[in-house]
Every structure is written in C-alpha cells, then in structure tokens.
Image (spheres, rainbow, N blue to C red):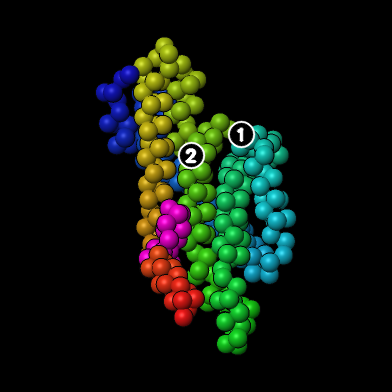
Amino acid sequence: MNWEHVLPWLAGQEYPNTGVPGVPTLLYEHLLYVVVPLVLALAIAIPVGLWVGHIGKGGTLAINIANGGRAIPSLGIIIIAFIAFSAGFIPVYITLTAMAIPPILTNTYVGVREVDPEIRDAAAGMGLSGWEILRGVEIPMAMPVIMAGVRTSAVQVVATATLAAYIGLGGLGRPIFTGLAIGPQFNPDAKTLLVVACILVAILAVLTEQLLGLAERAIVPTGLMRKHEQERRGSPPPGAAAADTAQRSSEQSAVSA
C-alpha cells in the first residue's frame, strides 16, 4: 500500500503514474451515472406501478417483464448496449435504468395493492373519483413501500455504476479497473487505488441510503412511517394488544351474561 499520494488524490490531484483523475472529478462522473438512470427509472416505474396497482390488473405481467432484465448480468447488458450504441453514456444509462426499474415498480404496485379495500370504499362512498382516490388515498399510504424500493434501487445503481469504467468511461470504477490492470499483487499504487476506491463506493452507497431515508421521513406522514417500521419489524401497532385484550374480555362477559 502507498498512502502518501492518497490525500492529494482525494483533494483533486491526478494519481501519479496511473492517469487516474482526482477523486472530485471521479465522484462527479459517478453521481452523473447514478442520478440520470435513477430519474429515468422513477419516471417509468412509478407511473406504471401506480396505474396497474390502482386498477388491479396487469401487475404480474408488468413485474415479470421488468424482472426479466435482472436475469441478464449487468456486465452482459452493458456490453450488449455498448456494441449496439458504441461508446458514450447510453450503454451505462440503459444498463442502470434497467436495473433500477424492478424494485421501484414492484414496490409501487405492492404498496398500492396493500391499501385497505375498506379505505378505498370509504373514499369512493364520499364521491371521490378514481384519480382522486389514487392521489389522495393510495399514493400517500403506499409511499413508505415506494420509498423502500427507491432506496434499494439507488444503492444498487451506486454500486453497479462502477462498471462504466469497463467500457472506458470514468466514475469511481476507473481506479478499480486501473488498479486491476496494473496488478495489485505487484504494485502498491494499484493496491492503494483498489482499496480506496472500494471504500469510497461503499461510503457513497451508505450515504445514499441514509439521505433517501431522511427524504422518506420528510415525505411520509409520521403515523404511516411508524406503522410501516412496525410492520417491517413484525411488531403490532401501539394499542393493538390492549385492544385485543379488551375485545376478548367483552366477549367473555357477553358469554357469561
């Protein structure tokens, strides 16, 4: 390991004897590879998931089609897209968008379908149209599940965006592939590039997940957020046990009477 060049590299200087740009440049490129596909995936997956979840038809087909791309390895998709579209950002965007869609689409569909039918019926009984029920009832109640899918997709995209360097682009994958090409078992600079770049990718993935978690808490109403967290932990909502005990007591009293 050769740590003397790490701080200047983190500050923006090119890593000596490797041609790898400074970390700020690599980080900017990596974020570009993450944000654009994630926005495209949101624009595709959320409307489709909301629609099929609302009407209750076609959800299985849409999810199976979206998940079909996951059967192909990400590296295979990026190579196929590279052959089809030549160099540039398009192969990376296609690959990462295809990877980001399934979790968002699945969670959006499941979140809408899990809304209590009695709540839908009550909203319809109040004279709300289908669009108003979707906008005012289903979307807010499904938001915790939707955001969970967004967080999953974002972390996957952050990690997989390193493959952009495989086709000659930048990002945090460049020092990884450069280090592998030089040979980390023989060159301490190559090993340093590999280790530091992997740590940076891991830190970026964790920060992405945490920032989206804060965004989820800001968007989702507190009551729904608490209920969703309790359901994930498998614990009953507050007062559920007491309500169940009270109901059993009333039933026993009625039988005794």
Where 124 sits versus 243, above or below? below
Q: Who's the residue at 39% across and 20% down the image?
A: 191
With 206 as the anchor, is 42 left or right in this view? right
Residue 21 locus on image (x, y percent): 40, 33
Residue that extends furthest to the bottom in the rendered view of this protein: 127
Residue 151 locus on image (x, y percent): 47, 52
Q: Is residue 187 magenta?
A: no
Where 154 sits versus 251, above or below? above
Q: Are marks 1 and 2 in contact (CB under 8 Å)?
A: no
Q: Is residue 237 magenta?
A: yes
The span shown in magenta is: 222-238
Pointer 2 residue: 159
Residue type highlighted by circle 2: Ala
Residue type highlighted by circle 1: Leu
Pointer 1 residue: 75
* Magenta span main SS: helix
Q: Who's the residue at 40% across and 65% down the image?
A: 241
With 209 as the anchor, is 78 left or right in this view? right
Q: Who's the residue at 68% across and 66% down the image?
A: 56
Would residue 86 be visible to someone looking at this image?
no
Residue that extends furthest to the top in the rendered view of this protein: 186
The CA distance from mark 1 to mark 2 is 13 Å
